[in-house]
C-alpha cells in the first residue's frame, strides 16, 4: 500500500470515525497538559516548602541567640582534643 492508496482509504472513512479521532486527539492533548500542570504544581509546592524552611532557619539564625564560640581547631578543620597517654616499655617484660 503506497501513500496514495492510504489517503483514498482514509477519505472513505465515515464522518463519525473522523469525529471520534479528533475528539480522542483533543482528549489526549488535554490530559497531557493537565498531567504536566499537576507535576509542575507539585514541584512548585515542594520548592516553596524547601525555601520556606531554609528562610525560617536563616531568620532564626539572624535574630536568634548566638551559638557559643566554636571549639578551637587546627589547620584543615581537625578538632583539637586534649589526650593523656602513657608510654609502656615492655622490652624488659618477660610475660608474653
Image: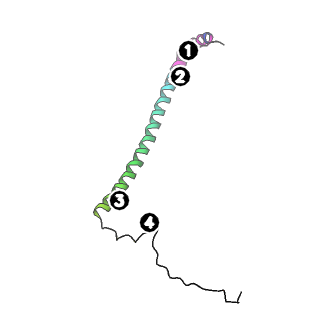
Q: Which residue is mark 3?
A: 57
Place of residue 44 in the rendered image (x, y in percent of width and height, measured from the top left): 40, 44
Q: Which residue is mark 4?
A: 75
Q: How many marks?
A: 4
- For label 2, the SS is helix
* In the depicted structure, whether residue 82 falls above or below residue 33: below
* In the depicted structure, whether residue 81 falls above or below residue 19: below
Residue that lies at the very extreme toward the front in this rendered image: 92
* In the depicted structure, whether residue 47 falls above or below residue 8: below
Is the Cβ of the residue at disc 3 closer than 8 Å to that at disc 1? no
Quarter of the image for residue 37 reads top left
N-term-proximal mark, 4 vs 3: 3
N-term-proximal mark, 2 vs 4: 2
Disc nearest the viewer among 2 and 4? 4
Image quarter (top left, top right, bottom left or bottom right) of the N terminus: top right
Tell me the distance, in whole angstroms, between the alpha carbons under discs 4 and 3: 29 Å
N-term-proximal mark, 3 vs 1: 1
Tell me the distance, in whole angstroms, between the alpha carbons under discs 2 and 1: 11 Å
Place of residue 80 in the rendered image (x, y in percent of width and height, measured from the top left): 45, 73
Q: Which residue is mark 2?
A: 21
Q: Which residues are magenta?
A: 5-18
Q: Which residue is mark 1?
A: 14
Q: Categorize mark 4 by other alpha carbons within 10 Å: few (<14), some (14-19), many (20+).
A: few
Tell me the distance, in whole angstroms, between the alpha carbons under discs 4 and 1: 83 Å
Image quarter (top left, top right, bottom left or bottom right) of the C terminus: bottom right
Residue that lies at the very extreme toward the left in this rendered image: 63
Horizontally, residue 48 falls left or right of residue 83, namely left
* In the depicted structure, whether residue 92 falls above or below residue 30: below
- For label 1, the SS is loop
Quarter of the image for residue 74 reads bottom left
Colour logic: rainbow
- For label 3, the SS is helix
Amino acid at each position: 500500500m503506497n501513500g496514495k492508496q492510504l489517503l483514498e482509504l482514509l477519505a472513505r472513512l465515515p464522518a463519525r470515525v473522523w469525529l471520534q479521532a479528533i475528539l480522542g486527539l483533543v482528549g489526549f492533548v488535554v490530559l497531557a497538559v493537565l498531567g504536566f500542570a499537576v507535576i509542575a504544581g507539585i514541584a512548585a509546592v515542594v520548592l516553596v516548602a524547601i525555601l520556606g524552611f531554609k528562610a525560617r532557619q536563616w531568620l532564626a539564625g539572624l535574630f536568634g541567640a548566638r551559638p557559643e564560640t566554636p571549639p578551637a581547631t587546627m589547620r584543615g578543620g581537625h578538632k583539637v582534643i586534649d589526650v593523656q597517654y602513657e608510654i609502656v616499655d615492655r622490652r624488659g617484660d618477660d610475660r608474653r
